Amino acid sequence: MCFKNYFIFIKYNLIGDMMKKLDKTLFICVTLLCFFGLLMVYSSSSIWADYKFGDSFHYLKYQFIFFIIGFFLMIFVSKIDVSIYYKYANVLLFGSFILLILVLIPGIGSVRNGSRSWFGIGSLGIQPSEAAKIGLIIFTSKYLSRSNNFIDSYFKGLFPILGVTCICFGLIMLQPDLGTGVIVFMSIISILFIAGVSMKFFMAGGIIGLIGVIGLIAIAPYRMSRITAFIDPWKDELGSGFQMIQSLYAIGPGGVLGTGFLNSIQKHFYLPEPQTDFIFSIICEEFGVVGCLIVVLLFGVLFYRGVKIALNCHDLFSKYLTFGILFQLLFQAVLNLCVVVGLIPVTGVVLRGIL
């Protein structure tokens, strides 16, 4: 009886109130992406999961667990007034930095795919960099909403924001995780652009950023190998170019309508990480151009509705916060899609929204 009353409370008080204020188009779009993601996680991972764990549903189960957790977190977060985020922005940022430091400590942070960026809980993994993304966006939104009159001043307006962004970027690079670091930086740059920062800053920042990227490549030879593999993957087809070649081999046979759900060939131990980094390759193979365009269209609708919500916000903090989260999702999606189709070197960024 207690459980029955509990679920009635959730249905009518929490979910009911949320649905009244909800952008239904955005909700439907996100729900479709999530459910399609669950289907594709099963399709892309079933062969590998059966071989490694003796259970073809292994990855699907974990993805479904996070889907349920995410759904209830969405309900919980929707009940929190935006002023709470404004009030505790500094605390959230500091907490996320503490997590980024803790994950670097051997025995606390676990290494996966050469990067110490996870807190391991059994087979589950949590990346503190995901919390840092949101914490930094909240802090930046608060700072800009309070200091909008100093936006063109390097010391009063930009220096504090760039300082904490560089600290966050540096902690992420110690893992190392260049893809996530780039997304963090681009998210903050997008908020500064929306806030009306002078174009001179972006020109100077672009030059400094280019020098920084060259430096990061120079100190890590594996990044240079990824660039050479991007330029000519067949030069080292069994080494640094292997992922790119197998991704293209998956996309090619898809044609217009694809090979059909569960009929991918590349997921049979050819394409590395088919259920994460290269899940869009499997989508291309099984659903063809039509399936790819539907996924891109859903992301387009998500972006359009997000922009509309941001423009309708009545205060600067909410506006900057909405744009920051929106652009973070957009950059991550675009980065992953560009990697999969061979437009940029491999970064290790997953397709957030599907995963």
Image: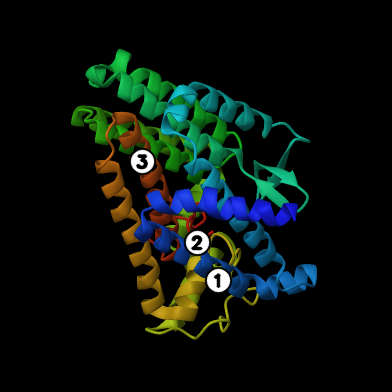
Q: Are marks 2 and 3 in contact (CB under 8 Å)?
A: no
Image position of 55 (left or right of 144): right
Q: CA distance from mark 3 to mark 1?
A: 28 Å
Q: Are marks 1 and 2 in contact (CB under 8 Å)?
A: yes
**Residue 256 or residue 61, whichever sits in front:** 61
* Three-letter amino acid code of the residue under disc 3: Thr
Pointer 2 local density, CA inside 10 Å: few below 14, some 14–19, many at least 20:
many
Q: Residue furthest top?
A: 155
Q: CA distance from mark 2 to mark 3?
A: 20 Å
Find disc 2 in the rendering and name its residue: 354
Q: Is residue 245 visible?
A: no
* Three-letter amino acid code of the residue under disc 1: Met
Residue 40 numbered mark, or none: 1
Work out whether 200 lies above or below 344: above
Image position of 66 (left or right of 258): right
Look at discs 3 and 1 and give the one toward the viewer.
3
Work out whether 50 lies above or below 178: below
Residue under the image location 30 percent in, 46 percent down:
309
Helix, strand or loop at label 2? It is: loop
Helix, strand or loop at label 3? It is: helix
Q: Are marks 3 and 1 in contact (CB under 8 Å)?
A: no
**Which of the two discs, 2 and 3, labels the residue nearer the N terminus?**
3
Find disc 3 in the rendering and name its residue: 322
**Image quadrant assignment for residue 355:** bottom right
Pointer 3 local density, CA inside 10 Å: few below 14, some 14–19, many at least 20:
many
